[in-house]
Image (cartoon, rainbow, N blue to C red):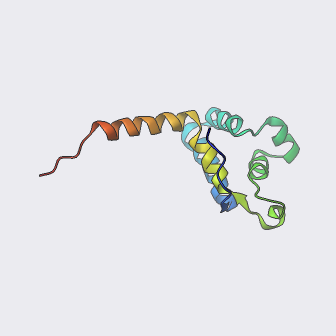
């Protein structure tokens, strides 16, 4: 079983960039899928008042984070690395790397 990573501190922009890139590059359906994957629900969005606020609330790091705007960027990376489209792409890249052997001249 994969354990959750130790928290590493990140900024608001770093957290939101992951979600913005998914929305921009893959569309809103992919973003909704990713939000569900991360455990961010419509109830969270309603409670927080917006999708952005729910994302930031989900990744807040520790009790002081409200005032300091400190986020767990390691958890952001962990969630991204376990998302099925990313997992599949990593497998494709690994297979490609294993199938091509460099030639020495």
Residue at the image position 66 percent from the left and 47 percent from the top: 4
- Asked if residue 20 shows in the view, the reply is no
* Direction from residue 92 to residue 18 in the image, left or right: right
Q: Quadrant of residue 6?
A: bottom right
Task: Judge from the rendering whether residue 31 lies leftward or rightward of residue 100; answer left or right.
Answer: right
Residue toward you, 81 or 51: 81
**x, y percent for residue 93:** 40, 39
Above or below, comparing residue 63 to residue 103 in the picture: below
| One can see residue 38 in this view | yes
Residue situated in front as seen by the camera: 62 or 50: 62
Residue located 39% across and 39% down the image: 94
- Quadrant where the N terminus sits is top right
On the image, which quarter does residue 83 sit in? Answer: top right
> Hey, which quadrant is residue 79 in on the image?
top right
Residue at screen point 83% across, 61% down: 66
Image x and y of residue 76, in percent: 65, 50
Residue furthest to the front in view is 1
Q: Position of residue 9 (x, y in %)?
A: 67, 62
Count of marks, rendered view: 0
| Residue 44, x across and y down, in percent | 83, 41
Residue at left offset 67%, top offset 36%: 37
From what the image shows, is residue 66 above or below residue 52?
below
In the image, 43: left or right of 9?
A: right
Q: Compared with residue 71, is residue 45 higher up or lower down, i.e. above or below?
A: above
Q: Residue furthest right?
A: 47
Question: In this view, which residue lies farthest toward the left?
Answer: 105
């Amino acid at each position: 079983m994969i354990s959750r990573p130790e928290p590493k501190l990140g900024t608001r922009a770093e957290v939101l960039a992951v979600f913005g890139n998914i929305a921009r590059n893959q569309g809103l359906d992919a973003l909704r899928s990713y939000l569900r994957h991360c455990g961010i629900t419509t109830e969270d969005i309603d409670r927080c008042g917006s999708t952005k606020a729910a994302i930031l609330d989900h990744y807040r790091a520790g009790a002081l984070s409200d005032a300091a705007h400190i986020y767990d960027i390691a958890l952001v990376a962990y969630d991204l690395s376990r998302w099925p489209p990313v997992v599949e792409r990593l497998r494709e890249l690994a297979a490609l790397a294993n199938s091509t052997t460099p030639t020495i001249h």
